Amino acid sequence: MSGSPKIGFVSLGCPKALVDSERILSRLKAEGYVTAPDYAGADVVIVNTCGFLDSARAESLDAIGEAIAENGRVIVTGCLGKDAAAIRRSHAAVLAVTGPQAIDEVVAAVHAALPPPHDPFLDLVPPGGIRLTPRHYAYLKISEGCNHRCSFCIIPSLRGKLRSRDSADVLAEAEALASAGVRELMIIAQDTSAYGVDIGYQASEWRGREIKARITELCAALGELGIWVRLHYVYPYPHVDELIPLMAEGAVLPYLDIPFQHASPKVLRAMRRPAAEAKTLERIASWRKQVPELTLRSSFVVGFPGETEEDFQYLLDWLEEAALDRVGCFRYEPVTGAAANALPDAVPPEVTEERWHRFMAAQQLISAKRLQAKVGQKIGIIVDTSNDEGIVARSTGDAPEIDGKVFLPADTKILPGDRIEAVVESADEYDLWARPAASKGSRRRGTAPA
Ligand code: SF4
């Protein structure tokens, strides 16, 4: 293996970009390339960039500069690659620049810079492909692009219109991941609930029957794999209501990540958000009635142009009533090329800052209260790490990286990827402390979902 060409990889941005990185590395590994752990050991470095916010563009340009300084032979891909001229202006030495999801182009650029070995061993690729996540969880991208035009976002111009994968293709990948040891799948897309709209929900064959390319049918089929299925980036279209019974049955996790972004109808209209008119508070109440353990995660933007104190107060009141479990809040930041830049009545940065603090303080109280209500309850958890210092796990209500954690005392018999039941002993605003439930509740790897 020492003679194999070595690739260094820097992956920036969101889980969708991470999936692109995994696909690039899987292709290269199939051709006999190996990955290098550092710049010095790499023959060429690929930087998968993010170009969503101006701050992310700056971070990507810095990463390219670092790779050039440390290694010198750099190929750039990802969202920032759409603006090849800007990259070359800052870093003339890059070998090649390709855009997002340009897997073939990146691989071609690698071939040009570093030819593949003559006799690749195709079986070097593990069944689930190359993944950048721990063995027990993975992201599964079901579509690319987006048909919306939210005024603060340039993703559609970076990643194009919605293009959904066939359901059989998605399900085959999910099966391969499950066979490779994945116990939890995060379903992602720019707009997960719009899955299949572009291909008329066309059905394809999986396990001898036709499955429509529609989120409800896809989730029901994924539920047959016996692994945790977690839904991200779900816009609250009416048909999202159909997912709730699947959660009640245990086919998918009782977890919905819905990026509401705001609550004031005026601000939502200015943002041009999809499903902005949906009666969300009534629907949240109805979802919780059907699935009391449902965890709702969302993200919001404060300081959007035209947001008045009245709009912001509307958002705080809405938040109080919605009592979402997990919430991220961003200070509005103009993005080069976004329509919102032309909107009047920019909110001064100090007002945005002050609203952000008020928002976070309000949400912390809500989150702490909701977590406190879990004390004494039995919950399903999945273990992320286990060592002499203790166990770090997540509940059905916690996605990796963005939500909270569950801490348990050390137990050498409990391993990463295990799904067990635990009893919650205490909580703060974000995390839980628990102990394993009585042994009959403990489940080992390979048994039914917790
Ligand atoms: S739904 Fe809106 S925010 Fe999300 S990717 Fe599409 S345009 Fe951007």
Image (spheres, rainbow, N blue to C red):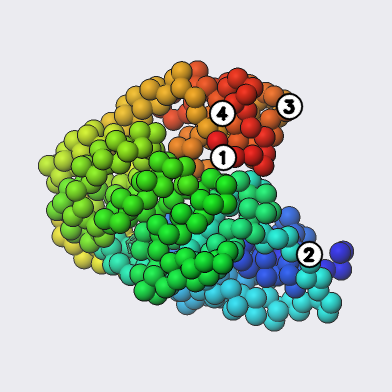
Q: Amino acid at mark 4?
A: Glu
Q: CA distance from mark 3 to mark 4?
A: 16 Å
Is 281 rendered above or below residue 267? above
Q: Quadrant of the N terminus?
A: bottom right
Q: Amino acid at mark 3?
A: Thr
Q: Nearer the viewer, mark 3 or mark 4?
A: 4
Residue hosting label 3: 412
User: Could you say whether the residue bearing mark 3 is in a helix, strand or loop?
Assistant: loop
First-in-chain label (4 vs 2): 2
- Residue, far right: 2
User: Is residue 325 visible from the viewing direction of this image?
Assistant: no
Q: CA distance from mark 3 to mark 1?
A: 21 Å
Q: Are marks 3 and 4 in contact (CB under 8 Å)?
A: no
Residue hosting label 4: 421
First-in-chain label (3 vs 1): 3
First-in-chain label (4 vs 1): 4
Q: CA distance from mark 2 to mark 3?
A: 31 Å
Residue hosting label 1: 449
**Location of residue 112 by image quarter:** bottom right
Residue at 73% from the left image edge and 60% from the top image edge: 126
Q: Amino acid at mark 1?
A: Pro
Circle 1 packing at 10 Å, graded few (<14), some (14-19), many (20+), is many
User: Picture coordinates of residue 437 (x, y %)?
Assistant: 58, 22
User: Picture coordinates of residue 74 (x, y %)?
Assistant: 64, 70
Residue hosting label 2: 124
